[in-house]
Image (cartoon, helix red, strand yellow):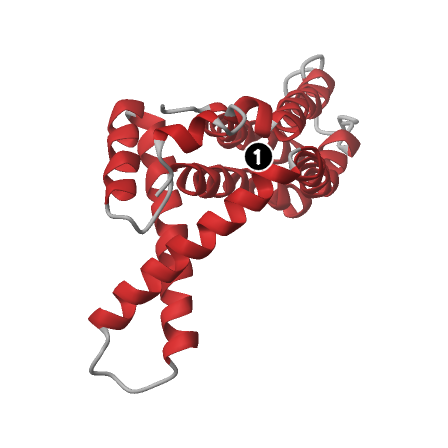
Amino acid sequence: MTTTADRLDLPARRCRNARLIAALTQLIGACADAAGAVFQSIAPAQPGEEAVEVNLLPCLQVSLSAALLLDAARAEDDARWLAAVTRERAAAKRTFAARCAVAAAVDAMEPGDPLGGHGQAAAMELASAGEDVAACWRHDPEQAVALVQELVASGEFIQDEILNDAVDSAMLLGLLALQEVRTATDPSAAAELCLNAVSHIALAVTLASADLD
């Protein structure tokens, strides 16, 4: 578990994730601009007019570039904060081992590959915790904070890894929405998917910036 003293030695999350936050913010603007390009083309059309020339290229561009943009930003953050990365990885090993131990205790009587089975269960438990926190944060941030604190108290998680996984969960939903742009049935649907992605990306910004101490 990360203590308060340990946290004081770490950068604030908005600093630790500065490149990612900047990229997410850039992506929000790109999504809005792409949707705007579609609707601005449609707006002047006369009622009943079908042959409307629409600029769908920005929607496709943001759909194709989003994941690469976020991956590059995260890599830049990691390169900038090498000491923090080292501590995060060490802490993640401890909490992963704790979750494996719990999985082993629950599953002690069942045969199989303990390392593979329990390791998978431990990884899935973290992903589930991140998803739960992200979903809760949408409608009740205070309840989400309480959930994070409850999970940390178990000794199987640390605060930052839960929040980081919540960021990943929100980003994934945004990226999935943008992926659907490429198969949208019409330009309006593509624009709406870009705008739908914005809510998920904005949540990721909030979670990437959140310091609970």
Task: Answer few, some or many: residues within 10 Å of disc 1's Cα (few below 14, many 20 plus, some between 14 and 19).
Answer: many
Q: Mark 1 points at which residue?
A: 193
Counting from the top left corner in percent of width and height, residue 128 is at 36, 51
On screen, residue 54 versus residue 116, left or right, reads right
Name the residue at 54% across, 38% down.
171
Name the residue at 36% across, 70% down.
118
Residue lying furthest bottom: 111
The answer to which image quadrant residue 162 occupies is top left
Counting from the top left corner in percent of width and height, residue 115 is at 41, 75
Number of labelled discs? 1
The answer to which image quadrant residue 190 occupies is top right
Is 155 placed above or below 52 here? below
Is 24 placed above or below 124 here? above
Is 139 placed above or below 124 here? above
Counting from the top left corner in percent of width and height, residue 156 is at 31, 51
Looking at this view, is 180 or 117 the one in front? 117
Name the residue at 65% across, 39% down.
82
On screen, residue 107 versus residue 100, left or right, reads left
On screen, residue 104 versus residue 29, left or right, reads left
Quarter the C terminus occupies: top left
Quarter the N terminus occupies: top left
Looking at this view, is 10 or 197 the one in front? 10
Looking at this view, is 22 or 81 the one in front? 81
Residue 75 in view in this figure: yes
The answer to which image quadrant residue 17 occupies is top right
Counting from the top left corner in percent of width and height, residue 74 is at 65, 38
* SS assignment at label 1: helix
Residue 184 in view in this figure: no
Residue lying furthest top: 44
The residue under label 1 is which amino acid type?
Leu
Name the residue at 78% across, 27% down.
55
